[in-house]
Amino acid sequence: MEMSELTQSSAPRRFLGGQLLGSSQLVLGIILAVLCIAISIAAPQFYSEANIIAILRQCALVLIVASGMTMLIITAEVDLSVGASLAFVGCIGMAVLNSTHSLALGMLAALAFAGGVGLFNGLVVTRLKVNSLIATIGTMMMLQGGVYLFTREAVQNHHRLISFTDLGAGYIGAIPLPVVIAVVIFAIAAVTLRFTTLGRYLYAVGANERAVRLSGVRSERLKLFAFVVTGLCVGVAGMILSSLMNAGQPTAGRGFELTVIAAVILGGTSLLGGRGSLFGTLLGVLVMKVIDNGIIILGWNQDLQMVVPGVVIILATYLDIIRNRANVG
Amino acid sequence: MSLASTDTMKAGPSMLARLFARQELALLLCLILVIAFFSFTAENFFSVRNMTNVLGQASLALTAGIGCAIVFISGEVDISIGSLLATIALPLIIIMNDTNSLLLGVGGALLFGLIIGVVNGYLTAYAGINSLIVTLGTMFIMRGGVYLYTGQRAIPDDAALDSFIALSDGRLFNVVPYSAVIAIVLLVVFAYMMQHRPFGRQIYAVGGNPEVARLAGYDVRRVKFICFVISALLATVAGIILAARVGSAQHTAGLNFEFQVVAATVLGGVSLAGGIGSLTGMALGVLILQFLSNGLRGLGLPTEWQLVITGMIIIAAVAFDEAKRRRIVGG
């Protein structure tokens, strides 16, 4: 880890202040601020309470999965199956709720399924040594096919559990419940990454897996852990999504994996592993969703919601490269 | 698994082991097994008509797969090809509708493809941005651009030129679909380039070890740049064939196509790490998956099962390949 920091000349990530000033998060923060100011000048309703809550609610789902995905990408692996898994989890959760009328059992089934998918991905990658990009494309295909074998149409809400509806639509005080859940998961993941030995090892595995293994740590287990955590995050997000839609949709989550990965990369986490932070991911998610929201508020064509993030990902990465070059030079 | 491997090592490489050591032979054997299995189990599978149909269906992935494999071998990835399929259909169909000329339409499509390839290649090779991020970005931009331009409606091919329709319906000597002929010709040309021309060797060198390639005097950036242009142009050809087949410019054309092509390419033994693999392997990978899905359909299994089984086979194949490679390295 020390080695990678020296060679990549990245700022020490243990101190929040250093991180804010020294790295790509500063660029991202400025982008976010400029966006917010520009949009609110063009459309003053941007700062209305209803709109801010809408943005936060939009962010919640992506942030939950992105929290796990950030850990995973820091270990130099990636999971493309999260979108397909999200849809499947929603259908399974809803089906279990319909037959048991118990939110706990439904959540448990969703978490077990999504965690199982993560475990499967992790085992294929760590035991069979399959490149994670390919392994999770394979899982994605299996899940996409599997969900249609499970149900051809949306699994409707027949149980009418109020606690389930609250999962997506409820509030704690003035804050939507999904946002609270997202913040809690984000906080746990951020503390784990920054302040625990486990977190430090996750960085180390991504930066130099061989060195970690030689120092006596079982690197496979760390990667397996990151895959399972990502899976569990998908489980939570899948239940919230099916609560918001009031149905388990087999077609939900298409392209979700790309949104999540784009937000993580935008936040400065390197696909090569060993570098990145959850704080950056938070900024990445916010930037993407503020852009989405701005496009709607300004009354622009909603198809721009695909074009603009594409431009932003490339630009942000390019800015990061230029900044790194300037630092090195 | 480990026991079995030590056994074979003690006994010396068996006939089977030697056969499997050669990637393409192992793949060919798999392909023959797949065809043999479905010939016995699925009705109407083993007929000239069905075989040539499968070839026609495979022509899209074969053509785009050449580019995908070349980019992989150069050590990069291109996942924008699915969106590219939908994008280049727009100039193709619009120009043909306006001018009634296949030549101008194809020219317009190729020009678009060229621009996309130049953008992907420039951002990766010269601006130095990770190719996964670049092509993820252009994938979003192109798909969104197509949605914006078309308002999410298909643009029908009003010109209905005979020569264009022949691309999907026509058959050489009434047997082999023209689309398959195009794919095979391109495959032969590029396979020759990769194996026997200096530029092919440069691509392998750049993907295998960019630093050594640079010291050997190769222009690493230029090589990678050209690989992206080749990939985009070949995907354009695939896009033209697809547009002829569906008879319109579809905004949803090529959704998930990049994943199918990447899967088939990796199944064919082309490594994501660069420098390893061959176009023959890629072609066999594409054919295995195509015959498999055709055969499963022949057995009456729903399309969803094809997805599930394809996913399992991709994972199993790469895992098997990896185990074999480690045994060689370890031994």
Image (cartoon, rainbow, N blue to C red):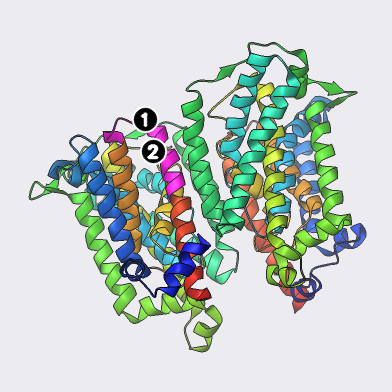
Are the two marked residues, 2 and 1, in contact with CB atoms closer than 8 angstroms? yes
Residue tagged by mark 1?
B302
Seen at 34% across and 73% down, the residue is B194
Work out whether residue B108 can be spotted: no
Q: Is residue B93 left or right of residue A122?
A: left
- Between the C-alphas of marks 2 and 1, the distance is 7 Å
Q: On what subunit does the disc labeled 2 rest?
A: B
Q: Which mark is residue B306?
A: 2
**Up/down of A273 relative to B170, above or below:** below
Instruction: Report if residue A183 lies within the magenta region.
Output: no
Amino acid carrying mark 1 in the image = Pro
Towards the viewer: B166 or A2: A2
Helix, strand or loop under label 2: helix
Residue stretch in magenta: B297-313
The answer to which of B3 and A25 lies nearer the viewer is: B3
Identity of the residue furthest to the left in this view: B173
Decide if residue A23 is on the left or right side of residue B178.
right
> What chain is tagged by disc 1?
B
Q: Secondary structure at mark 1?
A: loop
